[in-house]
Image: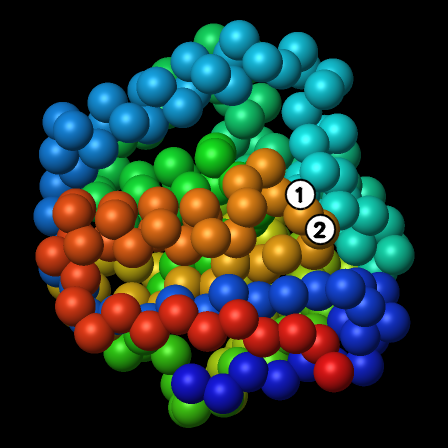
Amino acid sequence: MEFLFDEIIRTAAPGYELIAVEAAVANFPTQDALWQEIELAASEIRRTYAMEQIRHRPAIAATRDVYKALGKEPNRYRPSAEALCRRIVKGLELYRSTALVDLVNLLSLRSGHSIGAFDADSISGEVLTLGAGRDGEPYAAIGRGELNIAGLPVWRDSIGGIGTPTSDNERTKISSDTRRLLMTVNIYGQGDMPDGDFEQLLRRLLAGYASATEISIRKLHIK
């Protein structure tokens, strides 16, 4: 997969970095061991952050800043990592899903980054471009219906938008049939984990819980 960046993103997020992950996978129901890791991360979030502190986590704050630079109100369209942490601090239960969905959530909890995860076989074409959502642009968010993505950073394939930091798209979402994974770790600012630790955790989770092989990890910078 090739990754391109529109000028509007270069201006709004000049320090943006992408960790692009591709792998052959199997998507099982979430194992108890993975769920225990998620519950441990959630308990640490509850102990560490009051509700008003969540938006100040470095990676979350940086993502919110890009929303503002693009004209989007981050309190109405929260980045997924922020929304997940807020749910935890509110004391609400997390939804147990499949291994790929839940390991991505765990990575978001640990790092603060909003991470896109896609069924690579559902993506149209071999190029993804990061730009900004347009007024009236159709976008079927997972579990939310039509989402107003105007002013949100959005990854597009040859058909249209597939991922924003607020929600991925129904068309390219991960399912139990997913056999090829594409993951976009959107780094708008420094996360809570050093890059080396993040990659080590990423590889362990993919291999341990999704039987991943042929794992490719590339780090790309806006040029």
84 and 202: which is toward the camera: 202
Q: Does residue 212 appear to the left or right of 63 in the view shown? A: left
Residue where numbered disc 2 is placed: 189
Kindly indicate the quadrant of the structure image that contains residue 36. Answer: top left
* Residue at image location 59% in from the left, 53% down from the top: 165
* Figure check: 6 above or below 36: below
Where residue 160 appears, as percent x and y from the top left, is: 54, 78
On-image quarter of the N terminus: bottom left
Give the mark nearest the N terminus, 1 or 2: 1
Q: Name the one closer to the observer, 167 or 40.
A: 40
Q: Is residue 217 left or right of residue 179?
A: right
Vertical side of 120 occupied by 173: above or below: above
**Mark 2 packing: few (<14 Cα in 10 Å), some, or many (20+)?**
many
x and y percentages locating residue 21 in the rendered image: 39, 68
> What residue is pinned by disc 1?
59
Residue for point 52% across, 53% down: 195
Q: Residues within 10 Å of mark 1 (few under 14, many from 20)?
A: many
Asked if the residues shown at circle 1 and circle 2 are in contact, with their CB atoms under 8 angstroms apart, the answer is yes
Asked whether residue 133 appears in the rendered view, the answer is yes
What's the image's color scheme? Answer: rainbow
Secondary structure type for disc 2:
loop
- Front one among 96 and 193: 193
173 up-or-down from 131: above or below? above
Point 53% across, 9% down: residue: 47
Residue flagged by tag 2: what amino acid is it? Answer: Gly
Residue 148: give x, y in percent of width and height: 67, 55
The quadrant the C terminus occupies is bottom right
The mark found on residue 109 in the picture is: none
Rounded to the nearest whole Å, what is the CA distance between mark 1 and mark 2? Answer: 5 Å
Q: Amino acid at mark 1?
A: Ala
Helix, strand or loop for disc 1: helix
